[in-house]
């Protein structure tokens, strides 16, 4: 009996996914709960397991396609075929728990598997040997694999062969089209919705953080002995959290249906993290209950999980305010886009040495640029300016971070 396996409801309001990679092929024998495919949701990559055991009769969708919840993915002939051999089991891979199944840390394919156990192979008259991963990269970059001579065994095309093509000089007037897919498509959709929904305004300031700079230098060795790297970001996060206690209109969201401002009684900070596939915003929860060192550990751990794409949807939702540290990449001032439904985001630029008036004298100090974007529907410029001034006060005198409780 044939069973049509449809894309299940993955929760969190997800209605569609991108089919990232098939883990099986037509003709394979699969076990119940065996991972069948990888899909990419708004931000997380998850494996979808098989609900039945049997033989894969047909794959209905191609890698790279968008699939709606409830649409058929593949057909399985149920049962335990006696003549079918179970596919060899690959060694266990480290994984992190996702919505369904687990998240692989790496994707490796042997040349033998790639020829062509991968679904939807080209006609036999055009033999192109490449793994599914290479085929996906080629689609994303608009590269015709039929025009490439592979450097691998039997002419198999390797990822570095694609890099060679990408690095080759282009003719005059040439152009390259790269599809907006996966995480990049999600980012494009979210920032457009934020700009369309919010009445955004950006205020900018500069602050002397020499005291924080010296404190970090003094304590770096002690913190690293505990296995944590201490950056400036935990100090910035703590200063913002303290300032928000007196300015709750910025630690909020707007319910557009009821036209209500929802004030948050918790401090869950979204942290913009640059990854090879685009920007992700994992959430550090209960910032007010964490020490500087605990914040440093949270920043380090969430950043690692975001870059490895092993982060779960639960860790990507529920922020009340957002922090972005583009200074790490050399930026100064910016107009950060609000991480909707938050009503504010604080950006930190590159720390520079500048002449500065300190205690009545001109001296060289460590200066930090700040950029605050807020939703003018939630509060006015005067309140935002006062909030920014409070953040400056905590950054200029970090001892206040420890004198003030919470």
Image: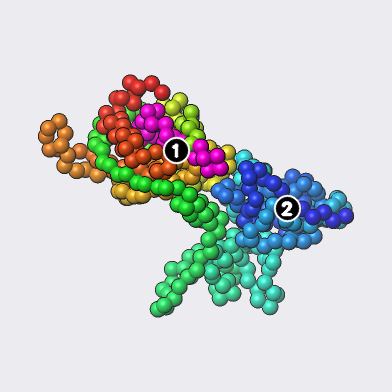
Q: Residue at x 23, y 39 (%)?
A: 366
92 left or right of 223? right
Q: Give the Cα separation between the discs numbered 1 and 2.
A: 35 Å
Q: Secondary structure at mark 2?
A: loop
Number of numbered discs: 2
Which residue is labeled 1 in the image? Answer: 321
> Is the C terminus in the top left, top right, bottom left or bottom right quadrant?
top left
Taking the magenta stretch, the answer to whether it contains residue 244 is: yes
- Residue 352, above or below 147: above
Q: Which of the marked residues, 1 or 2, is nearer the chain's N terminus?
A: 2
Label 2: how many Cα within 10 Å (few below 14, some 14–19, many 20+): few
Q: Quadrant of the N terminus?
A: bottom right
Q: Nearer the viewer, residue 65 or 294?
A: 65
Using a 10 Å C-alpha cutoff, classify the residue at mark 1 as few (fewer than 14 neighbours), some (14 to 19) or many (20 or more): many
Q: Residue at x 16, y 34 (%)?
A: 358
Q: Is residue 176 above or below residue 271?
A: below
* Residue annotated with mark 2: 70
Q: Residue furthest left?
A: 361
Colour setting = rainbow
Q: Please report the bounds of the magenta region as a residue range.
A: 236-260
Residue at 57%, 50% (x, y): give it: 42
């Amino acid at each position: 009996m044939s069973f049509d396996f449809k894309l299940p409801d993955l929760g969190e309001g997800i209605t569609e996914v991108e089919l990232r990679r098939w883990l099986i092929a037509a003709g394979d024998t699969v076990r119940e709960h065996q991972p069948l495919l990888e899909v990419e949701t708004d931000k997380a990559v998850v494996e979808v397991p098989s609900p039945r055991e049997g033989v894969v009769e047909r794959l209905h969708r191609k890698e790279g396609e968008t699939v709606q919840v409830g649409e058929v993915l593949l057909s399985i002939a149920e049962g335990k075929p006696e003549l079918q051999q179970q596919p060899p089991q690959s060694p266990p891979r480290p994984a992190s728990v996702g919505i369904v199944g687990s998240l692989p840390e790496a994707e490796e394919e042997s040349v033998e598997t790639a020829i062509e156990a991968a679904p939807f192979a080209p006609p036999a008259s055009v033999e192109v040997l490449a793994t599914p991963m290479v085929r996906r990269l080629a689609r994303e970059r608009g590269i015709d694999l039929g025009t490439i001579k592979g450097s691998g065994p039997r002419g198999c095309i390797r990822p570095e062969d694609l890099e060679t093509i990408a690095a080759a000089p282009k003719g005059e007037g040439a152009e390259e089209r790269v599809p907006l897919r996966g995480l990049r498509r999600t980012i494009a959709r979210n920032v457009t919705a934020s700009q369309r929904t919010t009445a955004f305004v950006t205020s900018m300031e500069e602050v002397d953080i020499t005291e924080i700079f010296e404190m970090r230098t003094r304590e770096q060795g002690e913190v690293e002995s505990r296995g944590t790297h201490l950056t400036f970001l935990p100090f910035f996060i703590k200063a913002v959290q303290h300032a928000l206690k007196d300015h709750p209109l910025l630690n909020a969201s707007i319910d557009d249906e009821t036209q209500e401002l929802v004030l948050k009684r918790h401090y869950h900070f979204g942290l913009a993290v640059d990854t090879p596939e685009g920007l992700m915003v994992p959430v550090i929860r209960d910032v007010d209950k964490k020490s500087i060192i605990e914040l440093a550990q949270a920043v380090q751990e969430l950043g690692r999980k975001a870059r490895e794409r092993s982060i779960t949807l639960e860790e990507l939702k529920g922020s009340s305010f957002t922090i972005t540290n583009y200074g790490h990449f050399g930026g100064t001032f910016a107009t950060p886009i609000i991480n909707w439904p938050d009503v504010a985001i604080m950006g930190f630029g590159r720390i520079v040495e500048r002449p500065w008036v300190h205690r009545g004298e001109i001296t060289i100090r460590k200066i930090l640029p700040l950029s605050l974007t807020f939703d003018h529907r939630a509060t006015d410029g005067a309140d935002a300016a006062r909030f920014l001034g409070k953040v400056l006060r905590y950054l200029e005198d970090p001892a206040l971070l420890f004198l003030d409780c919470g």
